[in-house]
Image (tube, grey):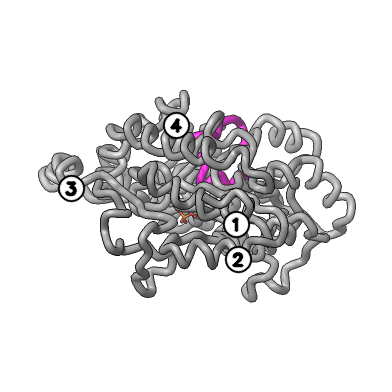
Amino acid sequence: MPGLLDASVSLCFRETMIAPFEYRIPCCWPSLPAEESVRPYFEEIDSKRWYSNFGPLCLRLQGQLAGHFSLDPGQVSLVANGTLGLTLALMARKKHAKGLCLMPSWTFVATAHAALLAGLTPFFVDVDPVSWALTPRIAEAALSKIDRPIAAIMPVCPFGSPVCLDEWADFERETGLPVIVDAAAAFDGIRPGSVPALISLHATKIFGVGEGGLLLCSDADMIRDVTRRSNFGFYDSREVEVPSLNAKFSEYHAAVGLAAMAQWPSTRKLIQSACDEYLKELSRVPGVSFLPGFGSDWISATCAVAIEGDRLEKIVRRLDEQGIESRRWWREGCHKEKAFSDCPRTDLATTESLAKKVLSLPMFPGIGQDEIKLVCRTLTEEMLPSQAV
Ligand SMILES: Cc1ncc(COP(=O)(O)O)c(C=O)c1O
């Protein structure tokens, strides 16, 4: 990949896809398998004339992903995207047809959209200030104050930082409430268990296929239910017993997934070296912190840092002046979005404080050391003006 600093401008991926935007160093620059590595799989699709509906490539990828996570193929379901995967898991597991879905406000809007699509009302709760995640303890405290039916709990792995599924399994046993974990960005760090975890395979994620979702759960009956619900409710027969969607994973996405699987060791290495560089440059800068375990226990295609001292806006401006894109992926938290402004919530003091200090820095496969050094120098100069270089 050419060094971004050598190019005068590079076309940046925009989340909204409304208009291309030019930055010298984009925040996010997905890199999916190149055409030549996908071509043999496309040829296989052409020869078999099987394009969707759990075709041979989808099943092969399912088997490979199951092996990757030390699961059986029946403990893995591939779906059209992460949002629909969360929706289907809620449809399969919710305790009441209607009711509340407890979730952090500190998440991407997809978590809340999924609850609404599944017929539930998001109930926003706060997160832990260290892990930025909803914990069983916070959820228990919220439960004691809610007097409406609670249908499900949906903790989120913030920016790829894994939550412990065993702790949530204990919570399920103690409360009798179903938990589904939104592990959208946690392909690298999540360890599957009896609580279902949904990983997004969107292009921006560390293991991207374009659009896709991967549900992992040791409970094969639950996975079967979600797979059935991703296919209009059909499984062994065309009898439909439960409300369902069409959220199948196409053979074309499976083709990209199989090529991405073959490249995973090298993709992971590239991201790991970017994480290492960020840690080297920023770990000793006062007022800048990473999520626990970032770069050592898990990696992600997002490098989110917390910046203390009300300096976020100024830093965003300084980065911008250097042609460096940074993002506040989760803006002010879901409760501040108009679509969810009517949703009930508890006090969200930690969420509101995180919204003022969390910033995502450029991170993508192939980002160069020089690019990361420039990002970190710009940030450090703002945090330590007396030591400006
Ligand atoms: C926390 C979180 N949940 C859910 C999603 C939705 O995943 P998808 O884009 O595959 O629908 C995302 C996507 O970025 C996410 O970050």
Q: Residue at x 89, y 55 (%)?
A: 145
Stretch of the chain drawn in magenta: 180-195
Q: Circles 2 and 1: CB distance less than 8 Å?
A: yes
The crowding category of the residue bearing disc 1, from other C-alpha atoms within 10 Å (few below 14, some 14 to 19, many at least 20), is some
Alpha carbon distance from label 4 to label 1:
51 Å
Residue where numbered disc 4 is placed? 74
Label 3 near ligand 1 (CB < 8 Å): no
Q: Secondary structure at mark 4?
A: helix
The residue that appears at 62% across and 43% down in the rendered structure is 285
Give the class, few, some or many, for how many residues have Cα within 10 Å of label 2's Cα (few <14, many ≥20). few
**Residue 355 in the figure: left or right of residue 247:** right
- Disc 3 marks a residue whose amino acid type is Glu
Which three-letter amino acid code belongs to the residue tagged 4? Gly
5 inside magenta stretch:
no
Mark 1 sits on what residue? 382
User: Circle 2 is placed at which residue position?
Assistant: 314
Q: Is residue 10 above or below residue 170?
A: below
**Along the horizontal axis of the image, is 124 left or right of 373?**
right
How far is disc 4 from disc 2 in space, using C-alphas?
50 Å
Q: CA distance from mark 1 to mark 3?
A: 42 Å
Please, what is the three-letter code of the amino acid marked with disc 2? Lys
Whether label 3 touches label 2, CB < 8 Å: no
Residue at mark 3 = 35
